[in-house]
Image: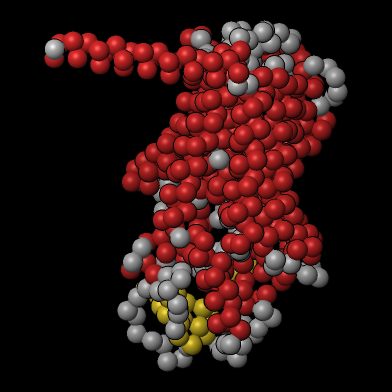
């Protein structure tokens, strides 16, 4: 009897397994890659709206940058072309980013310090960046299924976007830079197809360099693609050299000006210490592994394609160099390397993959759509966990509280803040949630107050008799 019962149980389990497999197979044949975009895009949009409308706020370097834009009124051009930025210690060495500064100044004239329109504008530009990447791939000859699969997988991997959409200062550098580089790739493809001269691609690349220096690593990816991708090698070597030469000229000319005329930011010089390099590499490997795994499963590249794509690893490692060796890490740094990974993986795929120009079975197209949905759900769970640990939804209230406190100190000559937030949670320290002395200086400028000396001290520090004293206990825990 026991034996018969076991056999019945196995038979029933097999029947259930077969039924589930049939249902899943049927759903695979019905779900198209466009359905993945229709599911992911609205959900992602709703999530951003839920996050931004009640909780969007300026923080950290946002105050410093917008305060500097306010300070630059009357001498805008001098400020834009300089390699300095105003802070708590006056004008100090920063970066040469005239495009970024110009955008900040224009945005400040339009939006002021109202956070919501800033963030919504960045969100719209990010969506345009995804579409621009799809158009560029289509211009390179990738099928509609492949380019749309790239767009949905990029959007699904929204951990790449999180830092650039939640931190205005990061987003105003990263998202316009990424959009311009996508536009540049489309111009390159048009030049290869001899549709247009490719001038707009060169202009877009030059403009991208004015937002962030890391745009220079666009060149190693282009060189690699022109050297290894079979579809691009169909273009004559002479024509490829004619297209690449102006890019190299702009790149080397930029480096000559940037390194020869403008000093390096001492706060961003890397330390050659494995304890700083390895955690950064681990973060990148962890975040980039998700979209790369999605590409492997969804696009099913053959062995030759995978081997060919390995030649992009040196270009990828070069693009990570500016972000390694620092005692700090910004989640906004994931965006550009993540975009390059997915774009050049999808570019010129194997003939049998879903992004080929050949016809693809409904099962292959549906599998890709299921993959991007699973990637989206996984990335969403990771992002929610991070926001929960940061208590991000309380940061706006913290900014408003600090601003209100500073308004009461218009006549103070010095302000000291005792930071006790990190005693409970390292992610809730004052410098993380509100900002540093430079951020406070930006607030002071925007409030129109007289100069002050700001200092942030560890918890337990004795009060300074010559300064107004504030105690920080973390977001949502009040202040004194």
Residue in the picture at 25% in, 12% down: 8
Q: Quadrant of the N terminus?
A: top left
In the image, 156: left or right of 446? left
Q: Is residue 349 visible?
A: no
Residue in the picture at 58% in, 24% down: 369
Q: Position of residue 464 (x, y in %)?
A: 41, 87
Residue in the picture at 35% in, 75% down: 459
Front-most of residues 192 and 422: 422
In the image, 350: left or right of 254? left
Q: Is residue 25 visible?
A: yes
Q: Position of residue 284 (x, y in %)?
A: 45, 38
In the image, 379: left or right of 32? left
Q: Quadrant of residue 93?
A: bottom right
In the picture as drawn, the residue positioned furthest to the left comes out as 2
Q: Quadrant of residue 128?
A: top right
In the picture as drawn, the residue positioned furthest to the right comes out as 196
Answer above or below: position of 147 versus 440.
above
In the image, 427: left or right of 360? left
Front-most of residues 453 and 154: 154
Front-most of residues 443 and 90: 443
Q: Quadrant of the C terminus?
A: bottom left
Answer above or below: position of 258 versus 129.
below
Q: Position of residue 126 (x, y in %)?
A: 68, 43
Residue in the picture at 71% in, 19% down: 144
Q: Position of residue 350 (x, y in %)?
A: 58, 10
Front-most of residues 437 and 425: 425
């Amino acid at each position: 009897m026991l034996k018969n019962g076991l056999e019945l149980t196995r038979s029933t389990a097999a029947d259930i397994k077969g039924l589930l497999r049939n249902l899943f197979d049927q759903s695979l044949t019905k779900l198209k890659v466009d359905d993945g975009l229709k599911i992911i895009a609205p959900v992602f949009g709703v999530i951003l709206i839920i996050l931004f409308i009640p909780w969007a706020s300026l923080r950290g370097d946002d105050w410093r940058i917008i305060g500097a834009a306010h300070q630059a009124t009357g001498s805008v051009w001098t400020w834009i072309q300089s390699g300095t930025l105003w802070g708590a210690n006056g004008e100090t060495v920063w970066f040469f980013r005239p495009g970024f500064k110009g955008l900040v100044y224009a945005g400040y004239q339009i939006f002021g310090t109202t956070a919501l329109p800033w963030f919504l504008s960045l969100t719209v530009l990010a969506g345009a960046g995804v579409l621009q990447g799809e158009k560029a791939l289509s211009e390179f000859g990738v099928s509609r299924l492949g380019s749309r699969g790239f767009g949905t997988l990029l959007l699904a991997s929204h951990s790449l976007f999180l830092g650039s959409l939640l931190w205005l200062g990061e987003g105003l550098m990263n998202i316009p830079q990424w959009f311009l580089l996508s536009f540049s790739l489309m111009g390159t493809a048009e030049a290869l197809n001899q549709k247009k001269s490719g001038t707009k691609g060169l202009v877009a690349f030059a403009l991208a360099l004015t937002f962030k220096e890391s745009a220079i690593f666009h060149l190693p990816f282009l060189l690699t693609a022109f050297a290894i991708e079979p579809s691009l090698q169909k273009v004559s070597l002479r024509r490829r050299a004619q297209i690449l030469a102006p890019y190299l000229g702009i790149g080397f000319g930029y480096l000559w000006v940037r390194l020869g005329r403008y000093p390096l930011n001492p706060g961003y010089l890397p330390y050659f210490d494995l304890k700083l390099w390895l955690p950064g590499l681990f973060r990148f490997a962890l975040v980039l592994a998700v979209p790369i795994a999605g590409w492997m499963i969804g696009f099913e590249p053959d062995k030759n394609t995978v081997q060919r794509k390995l030649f992009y690893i040196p270009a990828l490692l070069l693009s990570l160099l500016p972000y390694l060796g620092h005692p700090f890490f910004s989640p906004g740094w994931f965006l550009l390397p993540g975009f390059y990974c997915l774009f050049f993986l999808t570019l010129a795929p194997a003939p049998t993959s879903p992004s080929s120009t050949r016809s693809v079975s409904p099962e292959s197209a549906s599998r890709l759509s299921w993959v991007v949905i699973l990637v989206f759900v996984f990335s969403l769970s990771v992002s929610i966990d991070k926001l929960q640990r940061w208590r991000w939804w309380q940061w706006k209230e913290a900014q408003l509280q600090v601003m209100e406190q500073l308004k009461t100190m218009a006549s103070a000559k010095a302000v000291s803040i005792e930071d006790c937030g990190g005693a409970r949670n390292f992610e809730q320290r004052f410098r993380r949630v509100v900002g540093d002395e430079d951020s406070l200086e930006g607030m002071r400028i925007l409030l129109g107050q007289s100069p002050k000396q700001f200092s942030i001290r560890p918890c337990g520090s004795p009060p300074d008799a010559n300064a107004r004293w504030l105690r920080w206990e973390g977001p949502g825990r009040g202040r004194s």
